[in-house]
Amino acid sequence: MNTQKITTFLLYAILGGFVAWMIWGQKPVEVDVKPYEDRITKLEQKVDSLHNENDYLELQSDSLRVKIENSTRKINKLKYSIYVIKKETQAKLDSINNYTGNELQQFFTDRYRHDQDSIN
């Protein structure tokens, strides 16, 4: 055999032995997982409490959304009422502006029940 082949064979044998020792020969490393488990438990509790708080806030948000919608409806009704009142008032003002002097006098006479010729 050639020395280079023997050297290659020995190198592969040593490498194979090292790999086998790494896989089966080492003792498993003991890791204390208790602190990690405690931390995971605390984080799970925190997540649960945040989910509960989020659900509560979503309910509040929905409630406020309904209140806002109701308020918006009331505001729109009031705006419409104000619009109607303004139109009626403007119509009355326009009708008064169109009165002649005699019609105005008759209007106030009828309103306050005074005769034209009465002296108080």
Image (cartoon, rainbow, N blue to C red):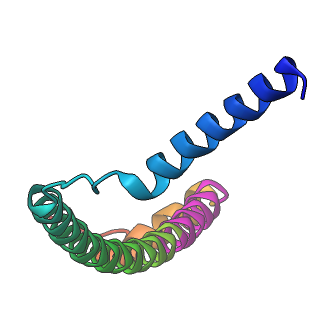
Region rendered in magenta: 80-98
Tell me: 107 left or right of 25: right
Tell me: 55 left or right of 25: left
Tell me: 110 left or right of 43: right
Query: What x and y, as percent, mark residue 36?
Result: 17, 57
Q: Is residue 66 magenta?
A: no
Query: What x and y, as percent, mark residue 41?
Result: 15, 69
**111 above or below 20?**
below
Q: Is residue 53 visible?
A: yes
Res 25 quadrant in image:
bottom left
Query: What x and y, as percent, mark residue 54?
Result: 29, 70
Res 68 quadrant in image:
bottom left
- Tell me the quadrant of the picture where the N terminus can be found: top right
Tell me: 112 left or right of 39: right
Q: Which residue: 9% across, 56% down?
A: 35
- Tell me the quadrant of the picture where the C terminus can be found: bottom left
Query: What x and y, as percent, mark residue 98?
Result: 67, 58
**98 above or below 8?**
below
Q: Residue furthest right?
A: 2
